[in-house]
Amino acid sequence: MTLQAIKYHRGQLDILDQLLLPDATHYLEIADTDAAWKAIKKMQVRGAPAIAIVGCLSLTVELNQKKFATLQELKQYVEEKLEYLVSARPTAVNMADASAKGKQMVRKIANAGELEPEEAKLKVIKEFEGMLQKDIDVNKNIGRFGAEHILFHNEEKPVNILTHCNTGSLATAGYGTALGVIRCLQEHKKLSHVYCTETRPYNQGARLTAYELVHEKMDASLICDSTAAACMKEHKVHAVVVGADRVVANGDTANKIGTYQIAIVAKHHNVPFYVACPKTTFDPSIESGKDIHIEVRPNHEMKSVKGVKIAPDDINCWNPAFDVTPASLITGGIITEFGVFKPEELKQRISELDQDKVDVFY
């Protein structure tokens, strides 16, 4: 049974507090958008798809308790709350994408003027609620396309995969992007072994991915971030599969800090490097990775682990949460719910295949 990081029914949202894993399993109630903003900022929920889902569902909880006199009042309220939620962690594009589509949706409803305010509110709530199942469906397609592509290039034989950070049930609605590919390989008995990095300084790999791999009973090893090169040299790694927080027009990809150096190492060892990217993570408005805003986290996250000091108080720190992997290093391809594409062809193919721009919210 896959882990459930997000529990929702109308008027009630609870999230698995990922800061407490793997030591404790505790669900945190998200009563409104303020609680969601804080949970996203503190990384109690993380992973680009999950951030967007929790943000939007927190708004449905809030909307469920409110009455609106006019459609314009509803529109203004939804727009302001969505803009606020984007500000929690701006590098990951999914929340911004959901915000833009949510604002477009509520403006369309308000401008049409065909519904009473309560009817319009319910329509908005239902659209946001649909994100949960939609995300699972998208991720299963990503898993299938990614697994098929990797196996095709390995004569359908079982493979060893290296992954970085956490991209599974804890980062999405319940299946995973990069870890969804690994999960699909496991389901088809084509997974030999998984190597997951610790992902310093927040240790999402050690705390979360390792937790999921054990839960799913996969053959897996946790490795230090600094071990990726040695792992590829000493052990056969058939592919690296990572997630993404933002993929831009030319295929450059922002992902958890440390991804860039793994991509360099993979190219040196002729290991195909894949990025798993739902279309909601693709941002064609930015031309290249140099224009991606990179979030810088507080120094204390580097200087201590669970409150235990591991570095001098007076040392300066540089703690970016993400780095940018150039498209030229994404040698395996970018795995989407539509198929696996070369980075340079992603923009055109998404444009051709995406039929959801106006009528479907997520």
Image (cartoon, rainbow, N blue to C red):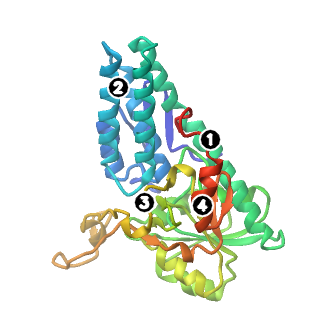
- Is there CB contact under 8 Å for labels 2 and 1? no
Residue 81 is marked as none
Alpha carbon separation for disc pair 2 and 1: 25 Å
Give whichever of 107, 155 is nearer the camera: 107
Q: Looking at the picture, which amino acid does disc 1 mark? A: Gln
User: Label 3: which residue?
Assistant: 286
Q: Earlier in the sequence, mark 3 or mark 4?
A: 3
Residue type at mark 3?
Ile
Give the residue drawn at x 34%, y 62%. 293
Q: Specify which label sits upstream in the sequence, 1 or 4.
A: 4
| Residue at 46% over, 59% down | 246
Badge 4 marks a residue whose secondary structure is: helix
Q: Which mark is residue 355?
A: 1
CA gap between label 4 and label 2 equals: 33 Å
Q: Give the spatial CA distance, label 2 vs label 3.
A: 27 Å
Residue 263 in view: yes
Q: Are marks 3 and 4 in contact (CB under 8 Å)?
A: no
Residue designated by label 2:
75
Instruction: Name the residue at 30% across, 48% down.
Output: 87
Instruction: Classify 206 as above or below 316.
Output: above
Residue 40 versus residue 270: which sits nearer the camera? 270
Q: How many marks?
A: 4
How far is the residue under mark 3 from the one under mark 4? 13 Å
**Amino acid type assigned to the residue bearing label 2 in the image:** Lys
Q: Is residue 310 above or below residue 80?
A: below
Q: Can you give x and y, in whole percent of width and height, for residue 174 in the image? A: 58, 45
Q: Is residue 275 left or right of residue 224?
A: right
Q: CA distance from mark 1 to mark 4?
A: 15 Å
Q: Which mark is residue 346?
A: 4
